[in-house]
Amino acid sequence: MGFHCELAGARGHRQLLQSLEATNDGVCTAVVSPQGYECQEYEVKTQDGYILTMHRIPQGRGGGSPGKRQPVLLQHGLLMDGSTWLLNPPQQSLAFVLADNGFDVWITNGRGTRWSRRHESLDASNPAYWAWSWDELASYDLPATVGFVFQKTGQKLHYVGHSMGTLTALAAFSEGKLVDMIKSAALLSPVAYLTYMATPIGAAAASAFSGEVRTTLGVAEFHPKGPVGTQFLESVCAMPEVNCYDFMASLTGPNCCLNYSSVDIFLKYELQPTSVRTLVHFSQTFRRGVIAKYDYESSMANMAAYGESSPPEYHMSNIPHDLPLLLSYGGGDMLSDVKDVQLLLNDLSNHDADKLVAQLVKEYAHMDFVMAVNAKQLVYDGLIAFFNKHS
């Protein structure tokens, strides 16, 4: 009986996610509230004029005891949005798991994604709207969203990032940003160095997205389902080393434990736009082996942006040594390879020993950390214990 109820619940959750695309009602109305959770929506404006939508689940399904709950901010990765944290049924999705464990959950949606396509003066159809890379996500989006939660709750917050959501946080931390508002940070599938990235699609994309290709494309927005995105993926899938019949594995590595109905929904509905400049920036990181700001590929343009002819590097060793960090990474992850994570850990070698936890989940790849059916047992329970320890 319990198993059949669970299956029915999973089917119901899948239908809610499908309705999100069909009705355009928004995350709170379409996905969160129908499952018995309170949900609130906020708009946050960045210093450079982008208007971002945040979703808040202030308490668990049962309500829980009154009093202040610890705020947690969830930051998604590349080509994703806040729905990342809601793809599985409530007992498997991190946003719901945190809410049911007494946390005040805040979900971000990065600039350019479905719920955050507004700007105070630019339309998303204007190429100028897309004149940013992940540098701006670290410099503007994160300070805006973290600062908003800090001001709204009156508390320091815990941070969870996945994939690019780890890189932007690390970059911000390395420059002393956010750290006065953060209690601790959990980095899932941490991305910093990309030297050993081995995923066929990722490596092909990183090799392709040079400044020359950006000019050839003639576009500022990369939408995976748009004409340029479709054409690019078709060309990549024609490569003999790429198996697009198993698209997720070719993109992220052999994930072990995904809920495949959630994967279908993700691939059909949830792939989100980003800027071409962000992809070029990742390509630069892959090809050059350093974590640096965006290279305009012009000494004059770099000088105008940075005051020097080459883009300055981010030094991860500058992250405050007493900032509690949890890094959880997968042995099968081909985007965030174990050897690249080790390079990051080398940079953190002087971190306070009692403030740094590194967890290797041998069977996991990149997407298991947000979509695996057993992620609660293998990752989220430990993450919650880590947050409670550093509250």
Image (cartoon, rainbow, N blue to C red):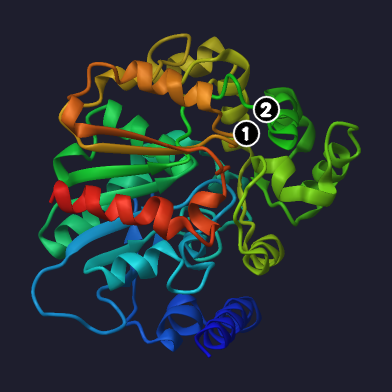
Is the residue marked by circle 2 packed among few (<14), some (14-19), or many (20+) residues within 10 Å? some
Discs 1, 2 touching: Cβ within 8 Å: yes
**Residue 101 appears left or right of 253:** left
Quick one: 388 or 211, which is closer to the camera?
388
Q: Secondary structure at mark 1?
A: loop
Q: Which disc, if any, is residue 7?
A: none
Callout 1 amino acid: Met
Callout 2 amino acid: Ala
Residue 145 at least partly seen: no
Q: Picture coordinates of residue 94 (x, y %)?
A: 40, 62
Q: Secondary structure at mark 2?
A: loop
Residue at 15% x, 64% y is 153
Q: Picture coordinates of residue 122 (x, y %)?
A: 51, 55
Q: Which residue is mark 2?
A: 198
Q: Picture coordinates of residue 252 (x, y %)?
A: 64, 41
**Total marks drawn?**
2
**Residue 265 appears left or right of 386:** right
Q: Picture coordinates of residue 237 (x, y %)?
A: 86, 41
Q: Which disc, if any, is residue 334?
A: 1
Looking at this view, name the residue that lies furthest to the front.
Answer: 1
